[in-house]
């Protein structure tokens, strides 16, 4: 019996030693896997990511959605890192904003705020700047002259996108200032894309909706109003709609109408991700 017990103890001792050996090997294998993964991450990180500078606050809700859009797009690439992002929220006088959006008044005062914000982003280390607001692109030429880093244009990026997607005619849903300054008209016509401006009543409705969003007082009725404008444009033979005010995307989703809706904010977010060099 003592002999059998001794043999049994030796047998379990061998099994225990074998288990420890397997555990040691598996541990080393896992360590190597972790090391390989870390090496891949280091390799990814060694490819420089350019710092995105967001000149935001025009308005704040849209800026926050724009930031999250960029993060989601990075995640969709399979990247194990988030992009470096700086944001300057323009401390704008709300009355100045309302006048500018509705009538285009106070352009020079607006420019001063934009230059200050862009300079702060440049000093902070941004490699390029994006502005998730269509109307202030009235000032992009002046901003580019004042700032020493690239500023992507939401207008230029949108026109390239529409051309690449075969759009030949598009209705422009925007602020009065954007319409009156013909911000999109010339750029679209240059690429043989016909810009369609809503009639006076429709434009008044669009402006009311935008004003409510800026005042943070929008309701479901505003979404219904915007959808009605789009339906009427669709009935007149226009299939493509351009949300040429970034605030409008807060209300409108692609599945809420039968027309094809192109969101300028989403297009600009895609351009910002593209500009991060390790993804290209």
Image (tube, grey):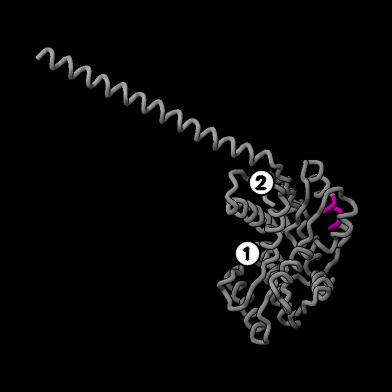
Residue 49, position in %: x, y? 70, 44
- In the image, farthest residue toward the bottom: 236
2 or 1: tag closer to the N-terminus: 2
Q: Is residue 98 visible?
A: no
Quadrant where the N terminus lies?
Answer: top left
Relative to the observer, which residue lies in front, 27 or 57? 27
Over which residues does the magenta segment extend? 110-115
Q: Is residue 82 magenta?
A: no
Q: How many marks?
A: 2
Judged left or right of residue 256, residue 66 is right
Q: Nearer the viewer, residue 112 or 96?
A: 112
Residue 220 seen in render = yes
Q: Which residue is mark 1?
A: 250
Q: Which residue is mark 2?
A: 83
Q: Is residue 180 left or right of residue 59?
A: right
SS under mark 1:
helix
Mark linked to residue 40? none
Quick one: which residue is furthest to the left in this view?
Answer: 1
Residue pictured at 86% horizontal, 56% vertical: 111
Does 11 sit left or right of 245 as displayed?
Answer: left
């Amino acid at each position: 019996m003592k002999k059998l017990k001794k043999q049994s103890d030796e047998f379990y001792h061998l099994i225990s030693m074998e288990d420890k050996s397997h555990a040691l090997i598996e541990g080393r294998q896992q360590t190597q896997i972790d090391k390989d993964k870390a090496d891949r991450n280091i390799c990814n990180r060694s490819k420089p990511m350019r710092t995105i500078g967001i000149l935001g606050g025009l308005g704040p809700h849209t800026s926050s959605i724009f930031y999250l859009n960029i993060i989601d797009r990075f995640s969709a690439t399979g990247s194990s890192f988030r992009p470096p992002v700086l944001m300057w929220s323009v401390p704008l006088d709300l009355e100045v904003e309302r006048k500018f959006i509705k009538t285009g008044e106070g352009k020079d005062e607006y420019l001063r705020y934009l230059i200050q914000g862009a300079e702060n982003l440049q000093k902070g280390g941004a490699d390029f700047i994006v502005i998730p607001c269509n109307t202030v692109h009235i000032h992009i030429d002046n901003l580019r002259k004042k700032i020493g880093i690239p500023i992507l244009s939401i207008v230029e990026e949108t026109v390239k996108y529409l051309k690449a997607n075969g759009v030949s005619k598009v209705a422009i849903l925007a602020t009065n200032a954007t319409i009156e300054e013909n911000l999109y008209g010339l750029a679209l016509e240059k690429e043989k894309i016909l810009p369609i401006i809503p009639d006076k009543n429709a434009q008044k409705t669009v402006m009311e909706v935008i004003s409510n969003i800026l005042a943070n007082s929008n309701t479901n009725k505003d979404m219904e109003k915007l959808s009605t404008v789009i339906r009427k444009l669709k009935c007149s033979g226009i299939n493509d709609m351009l949300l040429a005010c970034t605030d409008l995307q807060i209300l409108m989703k692609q599945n809420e109408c039968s027309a094809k809706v192109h969101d300028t904010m989403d297009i600009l977010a895609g351009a910002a991700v593209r500009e991060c060099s390790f993804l290209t």
